[in-house]
Image (tube, coloured by chain):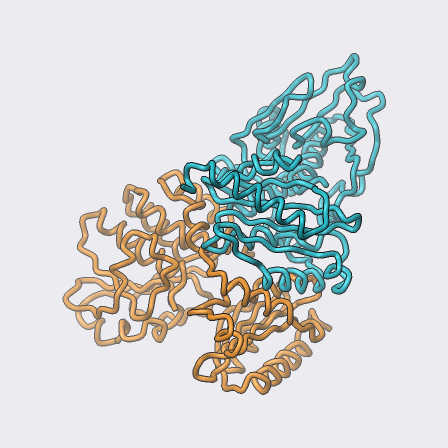
Chain colours: A cyan, B orange
Amino acid sequence: MPDGDAIGSALGLTWALRKMGKTVNVTCNDHVSNTFDFLPGFAELTSKLPTDEEFLVYVDGSSNDRFGAAFDAKFFDGRPALEIDHHVTNDNFAPLNYVDPRAASTAEIIYRFTRALEIPLDPTIAQCLLTGVVTDTLGFRTSNTTVETLQTATALIQAGGSIPEIIENVFNRVPLSSLRLRGKVLCDAQLDGMVLWAQVPQSLIRELGVNGNGTGGIVNQLLSVQAAKIAVLFTEKENGKIDVGMRSRVGYDVATVARNLGGGGHKQASGALIDGPLAAARERVLAEIRKQLSNMPMSQ
Amino acid sequence: MPDGDAIGSALGLTWALRKMGKTVNVTCNDHVSNTFDFLPGFAELTSKLPTDEEFLVYVDGSSNDRFGAAFDAKFFDGRPALEIDHHVTNDNFAPLNYVDPRAASTAEIIYRFTRALEIPLDPTIAQCLLTGVVTDTLGFRTSNTTVETLQTATALIQAGGSIPEIIENVFNRVPLSSLRLRGKVLCDAQLDGMVLWAQVPQSLIRELGVNGNGTGGIVNQLLSVQAAKIAVLFTEKENGKIDVGMRSRVGYDVATVARNLGGGGHKQASGALIDGPLAAARERVLAEIRKQLSNMPMSQ
């Protein structure tokens, strides 16, 4: 499930290296959302394995399992391989690792590379990288947005990138069925102490005819409620598994909760996929959060 | 109903002029939302009329009626008065008018003034002006966001402004009742051709116990639906009047519709206050939009 930063970074780096005269193949061993079909090179993002390339680069994945079949230690025999990432949980899985958790997006790091390599920017490179910057910071809203982030965005816009085009494509192509699903789910949200939770049963998904990921943005809206320190969205998958999406305000840690449930993520945004049914999964997660809250200094 | 740009610009200019050693009084002749109570000087924003000040400045209002009792041509006798604004519909109501519709916010213009006057920025000035920049561009998402906008934000952050604090206060203090109202309204949204509309009856506001402006952001969410070229939200006020909020994609003009209804605004965002009851108001507005759509080249 590559996000805008993974895709924008991969394509931005691809076009930048081609600008240097390099031959570049780009691969993604998972389904890529049509949300990003406005980016040049989108159609190249198919499942391919390395062949005789001289150099491998992995972007925006914190561990090797994020790359599926595109990661295999045997690919590293006789050629250098580099990963570029900004996740604090990165485990330095590649032979060469450039990991900077202070960067708000991997695209911000790729931009640094284009400056160090003195690659002339063009609108294609700029729009790919700007998509990474804008989406990973939720439009410059995350707490890790820095002066460098804004300076990067400024330079990318000067080079021909367009924030309105990104917003239009990434945020403003919602199907009506997804809007109605969002409405129904928000309407039924429940506050349990400091935790605001909501759920998306398969029956509702089927009733409204929602395809694919129709729950985008819901958990962030839950956290916008003043009384909510932690927000949780339970989504029942077709196979009966429950996708648990969690968000928290600064001072409240949902990464530990996710790890205890077999998932992972960041302190302020994490997730896990656990067994159903929905009601049992909900009780399990809320109990885990209550346990965690009782250990948090700020919630005393 | 002053917004974040009006308040941020007024307070930012106040603190900047005080930094120059000037004595400044700041007034707002309308209720100011508690949303902005995190800004230094918020408590000074009460209804006061000019007395013996040597110079008057009006900010972020496109016409004199936006200032209520704080505007009166007799105030201009014997002293200069300046308005600073970025609305394209500004009618140059003051003796001196600095109006730049290319600026994404009035705060962006006030920032230019601080540079021209070489006023050293501090975190107080920076946070007030940054609030104007961030709120009026919906977080750098509007189509009038420019390189200057981002450079202004960068400089304001370097001077001590904080986007996370603004987001936390302006967007993340939603009452649970407002979230549920938003959910119910989105859930019942109706598509009529290219127009997606939804309504907020008083009965729902009372049932959910929503206070004040609990409908913030709903009309923007309506426009995020792919099929919607125009979004309309009808809100029934306590006095039975219907508040009509309209948004449109680039190429579709809702300013003319609003003017025909006795309201006003921009091509992409406008509004009007019309007579009820709700169903009659809705039919009247939708008919007006259909008439307007049939005249729009892009909708043929």
Q: Relative to A109, say whether B219 is above or below.
A: below
Q: Residue at x 74, y 64 (%)?
A: A208
Q: Relative to A203, say whether B92 is above or below.
A: below
**Quadrant of the frame with the N terminus of chain B:** bottom left
Image x and y of residue A188, in percent: 60, 62
Q: Residue at x 39, y 62 (%)?
A: B85
Q: Does A132 sit left or right of B13 as displayed?
A: right
**Quadrant of the frame with the C terminus of chain B:** bottom right
Q: Relative to A47, say whether B199 is above or below.
A: below
Q: Residue at x 50, y 83 (%)?
A: B274
Residue at the top extreme, as displayed: A78
Q: Is residue A61 visible?
A: yes
Query: Residue A116 or B133: which is nearer the viewer?
Result: B133
Q: Is residue A122 visible?
A: no
Q: Residue at x 45, y 43 (%)?
A: B151
Query: Residue A116 or B137: which is nearer the viewer?
Result: B137
Image x and y of residue B73, in percent: 26, 76
Image x and y of residue B168, in percent: 44, 50
Image x and y of residue B130, in percent: 40, 49
Among the 4 quarters of the image, the one containing residue A68: top right
Q: Does A80 sit left or right of B1 as displayed?
A: right
Among the 4 quarters of the image, the one containing residue A75: top right
